[in-house]
Amino acid sequence: MQDEDSSDNISSLDDKSFSVKRDLSSSAKFGDVVPLSRSKQQSPSASDDMKSAGISADSLSFGGEAAGSMGLANMRKRNTGVAILSIALAVLNYLWQYLHPLQPIQLLYQMEQKSSPITVIGTTNKPTVVDFWAPWCENCKLLAPTLLQVEEEFGKDLNFVMINGDDSKAWPLIEAFGVDAIPHLALVEADGTVDTALIGPVPKQWLVKDLQVLKENAANEQRQSLPYQMLDVFANRPDQRRIQVQKSTTETLEIQMRLLTCHMSAQSNIFAACSTKCGIPVGVLGELESTNHM
């Protein structure tokens, strides 16, 4: 009897579902979706699964916030470590330079390597500082740190030329600038005019004020006098105050050096004697006569 009752119940359910499908199909229109089978039991949602597992949404939210805060803390630690390492390296570098200072003679050679060529005088629209020095000169070594500081301050507006007096090739320049003591700082205007020469380890304040005036003179037509002047090499020969160093070839520069070594001027009329003594062709001497290279 129970089997018959259950079969009757199942058949009645099938009849009801069939009638529902028939009603849906009869009332459906074109484009509507009509289920062809009994609707499946709705699967449990993610929230139900979380509840069955004992996990709440609040706990997940808290876990995400905790992970984010841990990542931020790690980033802060890393940045702090990088900052501490940078400061430590800077302190070690300072201590190394303090315990191992650069020798003045090394500083002079480094400045010479970075020196501008002598041809910048009167050709770059910038004033020029020409420093005549020598490795054995103690006053040159004393002046080296001051000159480096001044060069770092005015390097964009002025040319700095280092001339080693011990170099035999420097003798033409030594005679042209009238150098008889070192250190000899020739302060030259932008057009090549030598204003003055500062001799010895001059105070930095003097040099800074003179260079500031040189910088202003290069920008203005009206020229001011330098506040600190010492030796006027060209007082007795003002026509030679303006230095003009042309971009000559190596051969021409060697001829000039040999000519000055002979202590004879190209403007003298003793071309034959100078040619014989120095080995310079007479025609070259005639060309040098018509052109003032220095």
Image: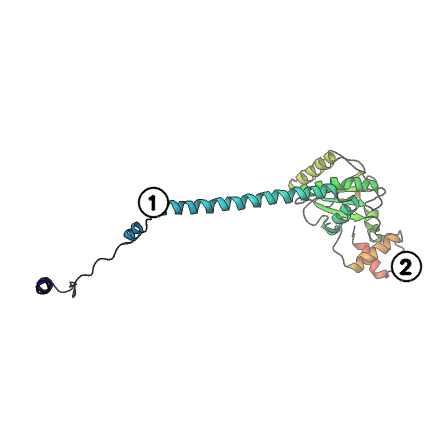
| Residue 16, percent from left and from top | 9, 62
Q: Which residue is mark 1?
A: 58
Asked if marks 1 and 2 touch (Cβ < 8 Å), the reply is no
Residue visible at 78% across and 43% down in the picture: 104
Residue visible at 56% across and 45% down in the picture: 81
Q: Which residue is mark 2?
A: 272
Quarter of the image for residue 17 reads bottom left
Task: Name the side, left or right, on which 286 lies relative to 211.
Answer: right
Reply above or below: 88 against 271: above
Circle 2: residue type: Ala
Local crowd at mark 1 within 10 Å, few (<14), some, or many (≥20)? few
Residue 27 in sight in this render: no
| Residue 208, percent from left and from top | 71, 37
Circle 1: residue type: Asp
Nearer to the camera, 217 or 184:
184
| Upstream in sequence: badge 1 or badge 2 | 1
